[in-house]
Image (spheres, rainbow, N blue to C red):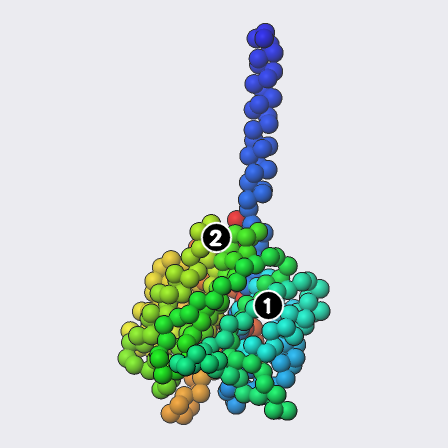
Amino acid sequence: MTTRKLMAASALMVAIVPLCAGQAQARTSSPPLSVMSWNVCAGTNPACRFYRGDMREVAVEIGRYATGQVIRPDVILLQEFCSGGTAVLESVLERATGRAWTVRSSVLTLKDGSPKTCAPDRQGRSRGGIAVAVAVAGDTATFRAHALTSPPWYARRMALCAAIPVRRVNVCGTHLSSGLSYDDSRPGAPFRRKQVGELLAAVAKPGHRAVFGGDLNLPPPDSRQGTAAKRRILAPVYAAYAECDQKGGRDGRWTERHAREAGGVVKRKLDYLFAPRGSVKRCHVAQGAGSSDHKPVYVSLNLG
């Protein structure tokens, strides 16, 4: 081959290589992802609107918050949902958004293995068990439930994860022990401390980025909520991930109106969405969610 032909071939290779590298990068990058988390308070709390409510009504309200806010979620994490509404929620979300959805729920269980049931609806019909649920729009997902160490005298808490291969993300939702007199009320919250460690293990999936949250029933480390021991429990999570509503410190806007067992009402941050550092584009806490004692929380992510 002549020197001129060799130079031409080398120039062609130089021109092609960057194009191929760019194409490979485009194939492996993930599209933006938005996630919503909401404790809908539909199970057993008579102070909430959807106590004994028809699950279609609950689903319509979830659909309203999935379409009417500044962030429209691709994944929805729900707490205090009733498993009997899983299929109807899928249908309602599809009509409300024009997208295909897959919804799965994982029921809390009692010490004898039976489900912790939601109160029946106003007609006395079963609404299934109290559950955490995860809804995924469009993408194929593989769901996995993880049992969390819980007080043996009360309900076993669950984390439910959806691994979405096309986005290379593992999205998990949970509802940790409440801290009330019947559920991990000991000083230092020993069961919630264990649950946080187990949650971190559950969200870690090889080849996937972790996005997770829910009603964690714990105060932020830099807040004035709760005891110092309880505030320390989420410190390892903040050290490894970004929480969508933190601005400088490890705190955020209040998300729950809590009626104290001893009387009175206090506003607290209990609801969280964690994601890889540097991925959070926007965080939103919805206002006026009068059907629940919790506000929906949203995050928009750029996972690269």
Q: Secondary structure at mark 2?
A: loop
Crowding around mark 1 (Cα neighbors within 10 Å: few <14, some 14 to 19, many 20+) is: many
From what the image shows, is residue 9 above or below residue 63? above
Using residue 196 as the reference point, say whether residue 128 is left or right of it.
right
Residue 229 in which image quadrant: bottom left
Using residue 95 as the reference point, say whether residue 80 is left or right of it.
left
Q: How many marks?
A: 2
Please identify, in this view, whether the residue under mark 1 or under mark 2 is nearer the observer. Answer: 1
From what the image shows, is residue 248 above or below residue 51? above
Q: CA distance from mark 1 to mark 2?
A: 20 Å
Q: Nearer the viewer, residue 111 or 215?
A: 111
From what the image shows, is residue 154 above or below residue 302? below
Location of residue 29 in the rendering, given as x and y in whole percent from the top left corner: 55, 46
Instruction: Determine if residue 189 is in view.
Output: yes
In the image, which disc is placed on residue 103?
A: 1
Crowding around mark 2 (Cα neighbors within 10 Å: few <14, some 14 to 19, many 20+) is: some
Location of residue 15 in the rendering, given as x and y in whole percent from the top left corner: 59, 26
Looking at the image, which residue is at 38% across and 74% down? 218
Looking at the image, which residue is at 54% across and 87% down? 119
Instruction: Determine if residue 62 is in view.
Output: no
Q: Amino acid at mark 2?
A: His
Residue 68 in which image quadrant: bottom right
Looking at the image, which residue is at 59% across and 27% down? 16
Q: Nearer the viewer, residue 148 or 214?
A: 148
Q: Amino acid at mark 1?
A: Val
In the image, which disc is placed on residue 119?
A: none
Location of residue 126 in the rendering, given as x and y in whole percent from the top left corner: 59, 85
Q: Earlier in the sequence, mark 1 or mark 2?
A: 1
Looking at the image, which residue is at 55% across and 52% down? 165
Residue annotated with mark 2: 208
Q: Nearer the viewer, residue 215 or 174?
A: 174
